[in-house]
Image: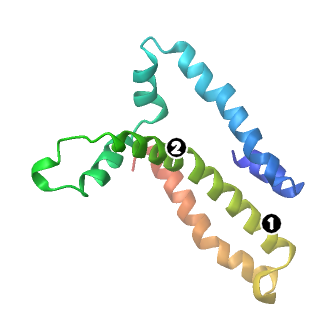
Amino acid sequence: MIIIAVITVITKDTMIGYPIFFAVFFYTGLLPSYLVWKGDMIDWLNEIVFCGVKKVSYTITRLSRKPEEWNVVQTWEHFWFGYWAVMIKYINPSALTFLIVYLIKSDSDSPYGGYEKKWQLYGAIVPLLGFISFAFGMFFNL
């Protein structure tokens, strides 16, 4: 996704970046995972496509009811789950990725507030170290 975002932001074709990203994601992620899946489609959706967001979605909707009705799932909650899952798992991360890449490019074209580029670099060190420590901890289980 980052490669597609960088290319489309540099070429100033960000509106085409979303369809390209979702096409690449479909053909390299969703379609192959479904083809190797041995279960039915509903299980694939719950276990692979929307993994991790179902519990959060139903916990959020449960808070709108009385405590004695917390374990009763209402019909509208299934629609909420579909909306919540798509937005949290796919739309929001892609939108934020394109936004961050666009902001980095716009700051490199004309530095924020007229500061010199070295101050831009100093300001980027802290988030970059945070990202590096996150990635390092993710791969080396710290």
Residue 79: mark in rendering: none
Measure the alpha-carbon separation of dots 2 and 1: 28 Å
* Tag 2 secondary structure: helix
Q: Residue at x 66, y 34 (%)?
A: 25
Circle 2 sits on which residue? 86
Q: Position of residue 131 (x, y in %)?
A: 56, 59
Q: Which amino acid does label 2 sit on?
A: Val
State the residue in front, 14 or 63: 63
The extreme left residue here reads: 68
* Tag 1 secondary structure: helix
Quadrant position of the N terminus in the picture = top right
Q: Position of residue 79 (x, y in %)?
A: 42, 42
Of labels 2 and 1, the one closer to you? 2
Q: Which residue is drawn at 81% across and 46% down?
A: 16
In the rendered view, does 28 fall on the left or right side of 48? right
In the rendered view, does 110 fall on the left or right side of 25? right
Q: Is residue 28 above or below residue 72?
A: above
Q: Which residue is drawn at 58% across and 72% down?
A: 126
Q: Position of residue 38 (x, y in %)?
A: 45, 11
Residue 105: mark in rendering: 1
The extreme bottom residue here reads: 114
Q: What residue type is labelled 1?
A: Lys
Tag 2 and tag 1, C-beta contact below 8 Å:
no
